């Protein structure tokens, strides 16, 4: 386990979360009620203000928590158990409906407070735009940050339908702030010609696949802090149909779990899982897969 910060940054440290974790009657399986003792804090970002096709991702965080109760706390993938960890479920950030920039600012403020408290932030989306607030907080805490982006889409537009703040522009904003040479993209299989050209010329771009290129990229990421942003639509719709903009040709659940194990070898300092839209998947398979990924993220990234 690596330290989240070089000592405690200056300023008042939060002694309790901002939000009521029991607002819906559910917390993620195994969550502690002790914020102060928690190594990691799980928080929700219930937003779908800029979704361009099928909406409903604002309901994702709550439903991921609910279906997590069907999981075992033990993972045979990592041979670890959630009972060995102390993590806190802070509930959902109350985001201003219809205001993406103010919502991003609230996410940034909260995640910044978690880094100042030396906590590992694990965010549940919500549309992908929510990630920019969390990633901005991460690169302020870790100036040498790298970002790993798993997705079906490039998300590299400068604007989408006239809007600079959109789920289709989030990674372009990361590139503009952090530098595209610090962005690693995996599993991409959709985007405009211009986005693909930008990615090929500027980011570390590994389209169509995840596990093989991620394994190859690990040495270049071995000694730096890494933030992982994981869009559920990197999976094929056969595995995860409950997402706003599904794209066929994606990875399997088995490949996703293999990728999580590979990421577990890195110094991951923040993670988010986004774009789960429960209303689109009455079978609950998307939500169940998402909950399993969250369990694995907790066990791989925050273990003692």
Image (cartoon, grey):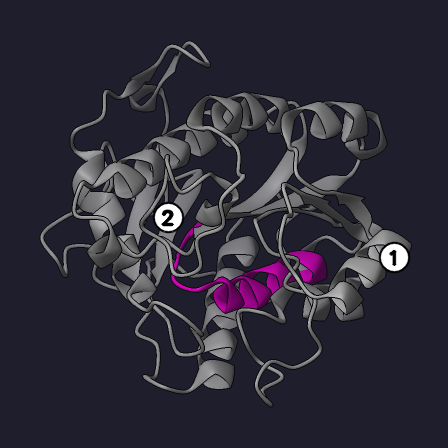
Residue positioned 71% across, 29% down in the render: 214
63 lies left or right of 234: left
95 lies left or right of 12: left
User: Number of numbered discs present?
Assistant: 2
For the question of whether residue 121 can be seen, the reply is no
Q: Name the residue under label 1.
A: 202
269 lies left or right of 43: right
Q: What element carries label 1?
A: helix
In the image, residue 69 sits, relative to residue 77, either above or below, namely below
148 lies left or right of 175: left
| Circle 2 or circle 1, nearest the eye | 1
Question: Who is closer to the viewer here, 273 or 111?
Answer: 273
Residue 163: x and y, percent?
Answer: 58, 87
Q: Of the numbered discs in the image, which one, if any, rests on residue 42?
A: 2
Question: Who is closer to the viewer here, 77 or 304?
Answer: 77
- Neighbour tally class for label 1: few under 14, some 14-19, many 20 plus, Cα within 10 Å: some
Residue positioned 52% across, 33% down in the render: 251
> First in sequence: mark 2 or mark 1?
2
Magenta stretch: dominant secondary structure: helix
Residue 30: x and y, percent?
Answer: 24, 31
Magenta-drawn segment: 120-140
For the question of whether residue 248 can be seen, the reply is yes
- Neighbour tally class for label 2: few under 14, some 14-19, many 20 plus, Cα within 10 Å: many
Q: Is residue 201 magenta?
A: no
């Amino acid at each position: 386990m690596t330290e989240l910060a070089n000592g405690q940054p200056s300023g008042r440290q939060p002694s309790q979360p901002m939000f009521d974790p029991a607002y819906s009657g559910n917390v993620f399986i195994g969550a502690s009620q002790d914020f102060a003792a928690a190594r990691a804090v799980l928080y929700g970002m219930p937003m779908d203000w800029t979704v361009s096709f099928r909406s409903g991702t604002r309901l994702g965080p709550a439903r991921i928590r609910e279906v997590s109760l069907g999981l075992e706390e033990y993972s045979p993938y990592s041979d670890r158990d959630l009972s060995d960890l102390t993590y806190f479920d802070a509930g959902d950030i109350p985001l201003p409906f219809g205001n993406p920039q103010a919502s991003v600012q609230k996410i940034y403020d909260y995640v910044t407070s978690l880094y100042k408290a030396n906590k590992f932030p694990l965010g549940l989306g919500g549309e992908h735009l929510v990630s920019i607030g969390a990633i901005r907080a991460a690169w302020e805490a870790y100036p040498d940050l790298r970002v790993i982006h798993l997705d079906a889409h490039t998300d590299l537009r400068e604007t989408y339908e006239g809007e600079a703040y959109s789920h289709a522009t989030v990674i372009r904003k990361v590139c503009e702030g952090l530098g595209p040479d610090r962005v690693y993209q995996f599993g991409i299989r959709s985007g405009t010609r211009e986005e693909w050209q930008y990615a090929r010329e500027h980011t570390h771009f590994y389209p169509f696949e995840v596990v093989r290129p991620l394994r190859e990229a690990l040495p270049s990421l071995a000694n730096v802090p890494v933030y992982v942003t994981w869009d559920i639509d990197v999976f094929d719709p056969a595995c995860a149909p409950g997402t706003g903009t599904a794209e066929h040709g994606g990875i399997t659940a088995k490949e996703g779990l293999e990728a999580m194990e590979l990421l577990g070898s890195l110094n991951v300092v923040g993670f988010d899982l986004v774009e789960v839209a429960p209303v689109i998947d009455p079978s609950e398979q998307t939500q169940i897969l998402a909950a399993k990924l969250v369990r694995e993220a907790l066990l791989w990234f925050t273990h003692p």
